[in-house]
Image (cartoon, coloured by chain):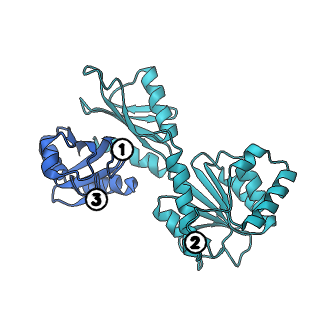
Chain colours: A cyan, B blue
């Protein structure tokens, strides 16, 4: 790899710009493919370019080309996307272990809570905190297909507007804390607010895998495990 | 984590060291690290990242040193049908292809 190409790749990553590094495994030549531009030492046919960009969108690194044909160039596509995001609504006790567990798992974590005494740097060292109403914060943060949203407040005033926004967004995971009873009431409210059955079906609640979690850290593990399962098991590999 | 690895590679390079990057480009069956996993090595033997559960890193470091010396990238295959891999030992029984390139 050329040092300047590595520099460009790192600059793109710093700027949270999706980019694919395409390597011709036979010649060692490399090209960077952006969503709207390419830069490097070889060009790509339209069909290949489309395949590279599709892989970038799906975050699926791998070989392309006719792998059975010895004469066909073997290209390796390495998708470099911004980190996955976890947006946590509610700077509550469970959010405290969930934020570092998610960060270790590779997620960029943001905790949203309009209640100033909850979302403090002492309670969440090193975590991005947003002191705003959840629906406004979520609109600002632009939920995409690489975003997971979890609501933890139990408070309909905070959770419901967040869920309205999240369930209508492209988020790959939406979960909400609460007992089965709380959940049933929540579903009634969200239905009255106008969410469709399909939109409601996307909600993971009660949140987390059933591992018998009791403590905040255990519940955080069950939530992260469920997000991981949704991310990894549903992907078309 | 990939960010750290490439950043470390760039930083070693900026210090004037020779550097090689190894990347998992394909896997079959069970393999410990997915496609895209990376490891960077410098000429003093420092390394960061991984391309397996520790089974093939030694062999990859050897090839990385060769790539640093001659500037030629190489594609390494490890699997049960490969004698080298058998010696090195991919205990999981999977297969993996690793691309090794110098940064220059």
Q: Give yes or no for contact between labels 3 and 2 (Cβ–Cβ under 8 Å).
A: no
Q: Nearer the viewer, residue A199 or A124?
A: A199
Mark 2 chain: A
Q: Badge 1, how many Cα within 10 Å: few under 14, some, many 20+?
A: many
Viewer-side label of 3, 2: 2
Mark 1 chain: B
* Left or right: A152 as drawn, with respect to A221: right
Q: Which of A40 and A24 is in front in this view?
A: A24
Residue tagged by mark 1?
B35
Residue A24 horizontal/vertical position (percent) = 30, 31
Viewer-side label of 1, 2: 2
Tell me which residue sits at (54%, 44%) in the image.
A234
* Left or right: A103 as drawn, with respect to B53: right
Tell me which residue sits at (25%, 22%) in the image.
A70
* Left or right: B73 as drawn, with respect to A35: left
Q: Nearer the viewer, residue B59 or A41?
A: B59
Sequence-wise, the earlier of marks 3 and 1 is 1
Residue B97 horizontal/vertical position (percent) = 26, 41
């Amino acid at each position: 790899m050329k040092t300047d190409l590595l520099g460009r790749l790192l600059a793109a990553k710093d700027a949270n710009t999706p980019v694919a590094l395409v390597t011709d495994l036979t010649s060692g030549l490399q090209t960077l493919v952006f969503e709207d531009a390419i830069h490097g030492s070889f060009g790509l046919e339209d069909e290949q370019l489309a395949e590279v960009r599709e892989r970038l969108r799906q975050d699926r690194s791998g070989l392309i080309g006719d792998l059975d044909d010895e004469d066909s160039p073997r290209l390796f596509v390495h998708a470099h996307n911004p980190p996955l995001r976890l947006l946590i609504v509610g700077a509550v006790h469970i959010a405290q272990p969930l934020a570092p567990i998610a960060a270790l798992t590779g997620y960029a974590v943001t905790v949203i809570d309009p209640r100033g005494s909850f979302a403090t740097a002492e309670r969440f060292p090193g975590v991005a905190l947003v002191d705003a109403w959840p629906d406004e914060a979520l609109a600002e943060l632009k939920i995409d297909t690489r975003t997971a949203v979890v609501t933890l407040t139990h408070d309909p005033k905070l959770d419901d507007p967040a869920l309205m926004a999240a369930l209508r967004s492209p988020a790959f995971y939406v979960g909400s804390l609460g007992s089965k009873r709380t959940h049933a009431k929540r579903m009634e409210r969200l239905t009255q607010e106008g969410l469709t059955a399909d939109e409601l079906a996307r909600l993971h609640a009660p949140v987390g895998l059933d591992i018998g979690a009791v403590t905040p850290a255990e519940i955080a593990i069950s939530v992260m495990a469920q997000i991981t399962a949704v991310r990894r098991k549903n992907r078309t590999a | 984590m990939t960010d750290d690895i490439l950043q470390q590679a760039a930083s070693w390079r900026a210090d004037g060291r020779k550097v090689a990057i190894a990347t998992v480009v394909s896997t079959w069956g069970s393999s410990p690290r997915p496609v895209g996993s990376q490891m960077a090595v410098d000429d003093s033997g420092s390394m960061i990242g991984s391309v397996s559960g520790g089974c093939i890193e030694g062999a990859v470091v050897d090839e990385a040193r060769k790539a640093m010396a001659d500037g030629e990238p190489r594609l390494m295959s490890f699997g049960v049908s490969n004698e080298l891999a058998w010696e090195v030992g991919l205990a999981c029984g999977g297969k993996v292809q690793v691309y090794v390139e110098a940064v220059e």
